[in-house]
């Protein structure tokens, strides 16, 4: 009986000593969890091997596409392919990124070197080929762009930068067809100071907003 009472006393003492230890450990555990959350959300130091840009992309589903000082925050699912002084931003299916008109859903960003090669001034539509391009939707026939823009205006591309915007009507018509036409609009944003041109054939609704919110570095 005496041994049993002694054993119970030892167990009670151990429980009393363990309680403060657990209580003091609880705040430390909460602080560690808070630190981990801060790191995941980008407010703390990123984990080893993960850049801050990657953390931001993971958290927001976007990434920064930079071209000659112009920075656009685009969806992380869009892919950027660069060819010298030109970049193709694909927003969907792309069977042949080398050939912009027919094979890819996306838009092009062209720099001054490429614009100079084609003699682009903004007075006429941009055609990224020496020959008449194929239909931009992959259909049969050739693309024909009008000689007169449907609309022209000045649009903001980030703070302190303005673009000459033009919408060029076009159509596709198969050779030897009955005359059935598929119409489209080629939209262009030309920044005369930066000598950057953005060309969109697919009427991306979000593109105007992305350009308006551009930042510059």
Image (tube, grey):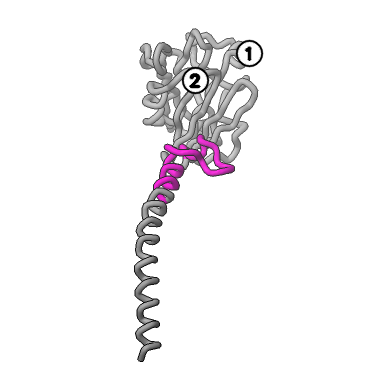
Local secondary structure at mark 2: strand
Q: Position of residue 29 (x, y in %)?
A: 41, 54
Looking at the rendered image, the disc whose residue lies closer to the viewer, 2 or 1, is 2
Give the residue drawn at x 47%, y 14%: 190
Of all residues, the one furthest to the bottom in this rendering is 1
In reply to whether residue 85 is colored magenta, the answer given is: no
Principal SS element in the magenta part?
helix
Residue position for label 2: 70
Label 1: state its secondary structure: helix
Residue 96 % position (x, y): 60, 37
Residue 78 in picture, x, y percent from top left: 49, 37
Judge from the rendering whether residue 202 lies leftward or rightward of residue 112; answer left or right.
Answer: left
Classify the position of the N terminus by image quarter.
bottom left
Q: Is residue 149 visible?
A: no
Q: Are there few (<14), some (14-19), or many (20+) residues within 10 Å of tag 2?
A: some
Of residues 83 and 94, the one nearer the viewer is: 83
Q: Is residue 85 left or right of residue 46?
A: right
Q: Who comes first in sequence, dot 2 or dot 1? A: 2
Asked whether the beta carbons under mark 2 and mark 1 sit within 8 Å of each other, the answer is no
Q: Is residue 142 visible?
A: yes
At horizontal 55% and vertical 36% (from top left) the residue drawn is 103
Q: Which residues are magenta?
A: 33-57
Q: Which mark is residue 117?
A: 1
Q: Is residue 34 magenta?
A: yes
Residue at image coords 41%, 15%: 165
């Amino acid at each position: 009986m005496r041994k049993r009472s002694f054993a119970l006393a030892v167990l009670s003492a151990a429980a009393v000593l363990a309680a403060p230890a657990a209580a003091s450990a609880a705040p430390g555990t909460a602080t560690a969890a808070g630190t981990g959350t801060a790191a995941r959300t980008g407010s703390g130091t990123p984990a080893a091997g993960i850049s801050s840009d990657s953390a931001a992309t993971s958290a927001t589903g976007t990434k920064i596409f930079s071209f000659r000082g112009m920075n656009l925050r685009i969806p992380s699912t869009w892919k950027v392919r660069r060819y010298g002084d030109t970049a193709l931003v694909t927003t969907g299916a792309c069977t042949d990124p080398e050939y912009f008109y027919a094979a890819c859903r996306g838009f092009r960003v062209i720099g001054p070197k490429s614009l100079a090669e084609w003699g682009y001034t903004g007075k006429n539509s941009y055609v990224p080929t020496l020959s008449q391009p194929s239909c931009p939707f992959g259909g049969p026939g050739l693309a024909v762009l009008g000689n007169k823009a449907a609309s022209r205006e000045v649009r903001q591309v980030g703070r302190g930068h303005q673009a000459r915007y033009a919408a060029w009507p076009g159509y596709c018509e198969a050779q030897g067809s009955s005359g059935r036409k598929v119409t489209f609009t080629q939209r262009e944003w030309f920044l005369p100071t930066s000598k950057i041109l953005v060309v969109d054939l697919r009427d991306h609704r979000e593109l105007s907003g992305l350009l308006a919110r551009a930042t510059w570095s």
